[in-house]
Image (tube, rainbow, N blue to C red):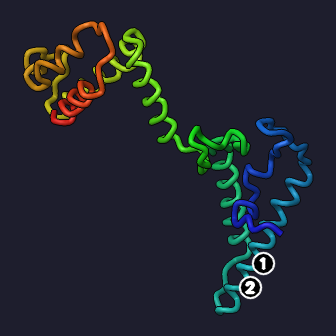
Amino acid sequence: MSDGGLEELFGSRGDEAFVEEPGEVVEKPRSRAGWIFRNVALIVVATVVTVAGLRSRGISVSILLIVAAFVALRLLMLAVSEVAPPVPPRRSASRGADSSGSRLAGTDTLRAAVRRWERQLDWSQSDAEKFSRNVLPVLAELADERLRLKHGITRSSDPRRARELLGEPLWGFLDAPVRRGPKARELATYVDALERI
C-alpha cells in the first residue's frame, strides 16, 4: 500500500503515465467509464463523510448543496491539473551523479545555471571569441539592468553618466571588443564594480 496522500486520492497526473525504460514515458490506456466511476465514487464518499460529520454535530445542511460543493471542487481540481507543469523526467542512477561522483538531489535549476556559467567562464580563458559572444553580452545586460534599477539610466540612454557610475575600467571592458579572455582577477574586479553600482 503506497502512501501517496491527497495527490493519489484525487487522481494526480503521476498515475497517467509510467516509465517503461529510462527516459521513455508511455501513456497508460484509460477507460472513460472508469474515470467517471472514480470521480462519482469520490464525490459520494466525500458527501457521506461530510453529512455524517455535520449531523453528528447537530448541523443540518442540504445534501444537494454538499454534492454541488464537491462537484465544483472536483471540477476545479481537474481544471488545475490540466494547467499543471509537466512531470519532470526521472534521472537514472548513471546520469544522476555529477563529475565529482556525488549524487544529485532531483533537478536543481540553480545548480544547472551555475554549472553553465562555470563552463562559459572556463571557455573564456582559452577562447576570446566565445567570451565575447556568450559572456560579455550578459555582463553588459547586467550592467544596464543595474544602472536602470539604481539610477534610472542605461549605457545607451545616458552614456556620460553611465561611464561615471561604471568606472573607466568596466566601461572600457564592456565597450571595447575583447581580444583575449580576462583573467580571473580582472573578472573579479569587474564584478565588484558591477556590485557597487
- In the rendered view, tell whether residue 32 sits above or below residue 133: below
- Residue at (18, 30) in percent of width and height: 193
Instruction: Tell me: residue 131, above or below residue 97.
Output: above
- Residue 109 visible: yes
Q: Nearer the viewer, residue 47 or 82?
A: 82
Secondary structure type for disc 1: helix
Residue 77 in the image, given as x and y percentages of width and height: 67, 55
Q: Badge 1: how crowded within 10 Å, few (<14), some, or many (20+)?
A: some
Q: Residue at x 54, y 44 (%)?
A: 108
From the top left corner, tell me how far across and down residue 101 is, in percent: 61, 44
Q: Residues within 10 Å of mark 2 (few under 14, many from 20)?
A: few
Amino acid of disc 1: Val
Q: Position of residue 24 (x, y in %)?
A: 80, 36
Q: Where the C terminus falls, by quadrant?
A: top left
Could you tell me how many numbered marks the image carries?
Answer: 2
- Name which residue lies at 39% across and 9% down: 129
Q: Is residue 51 above or below residue 90?
A: below
Q: Is residue 124 above or below residue 146?
A: above
Q: Quadrant of residue 178?
A: top left
**Residue occupied by mark 2:** 52
Depth order, front residue of 132/35: 132
Tell me if label 1 and label 2 are in contact, CB under 8 Å. Answer: yes
Which kind of residue does numbered mark 2 sit on? Ala
Q: Is residue 37 left or right of residue 69?
A: right
Q: State the quadrant of the N terminus.
A: bottom right
**Which residue, given by chain and number where applicable, does mark 1 sit on?**
48
